[in-house]
Image (tube, rainbow, N blue to C red):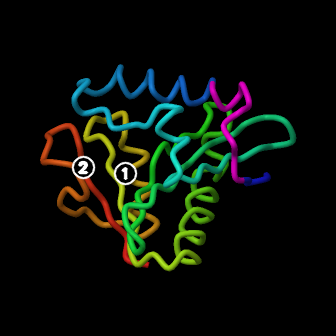
Amino acid sequence: MRIEVDDLSRPQVHALLTEHLEDMHATSPAESVHALDLSGLSGPDVTVWTVWDVNTLWGIAALKELDPEHGELKSMRTSAEARGRGVASSLLVHVLDDARRRGYVRVSLETGTQDYFAAARRLYVRHGFVECPPFADYVLDPSSTFFSLSL
């Protein structure tokens, strides 16, 4: 398993991001979908990592800088064939380690409340995230739940 910073140029990455956005729109009301598209992930305040097994893309995650001490986890996604192999956990640890190197004191995230997102919520809690109020520009929304981790 190889984790690397990604420039978002490869077709496999585009396909996984498209799948991610399609699933977000299929499971959440449009106003509650906060996943970034390719242009949003290409911003100067966002770093994207991908996980590879040789030439097979296993997952993606991004970290958006909200301010010099606070980052937001975005676009966390594991391919169907990689699920259950510890890929998401390894990628999350990698991103959190980078957040610590940057000097962040907190990483937060938004995810869905629907059953579809239950595995993601369990992953975040296993890694020490706790529920928190909306942060940044988010507002209370019955389709969203918010988590934060003090680093």
Is the residue under label 2 in contact with that under label 1 (CB below 8 Å)? yes
The kind of secondary structure element at disc 2 is: strand
Q: CA distance from mark 1 to mark 2?
A: 9 Å
Q: Residue at x 12, y 47 (%)?
A: 140
Q: Residue at x 70, y 53 (%)?
A: 5
Judge from the rendering whether residue 64 lies leftward or rightward of residue 136; answer left or right.
Answer: right
Instruction: Determine which quarter of the picture holds residue 129.
Output: bottom left
Q: Residue at x 56, y 48 (%)?
A: 61
Seen from the viewer's position, the closer of residues 59 and 7 is 7
Q: Residues within 10 Å of mark 1 (few under 14, many from 20)?
A: many
- Amino acid carrying label 1: it is Arg
Report the residue marked by disc 1: 121
Residue 76 location (% of width, % of height): 51, 45
Judge from the rendering whether residue 127 lies leftward or rightward of residue 116; answer left or right.
Answer: right
Residue 151 location (% of width, % of height): 44, 78
Residue range in magenta is: 5-14
Seen from the viewer's position, the closer of residues 100 and 122 is 100
Residue 44 location (% of width, % of height): 53, 51
Report the residue marked by disc 2: 145
Comparing marks 1 and 2, which lies closer to the viewer?
Answer: 2
In the drawing, what numbered circle is on residue 48? none
Seen from the viewer's position, the closer of residues 47 and 106 is 47
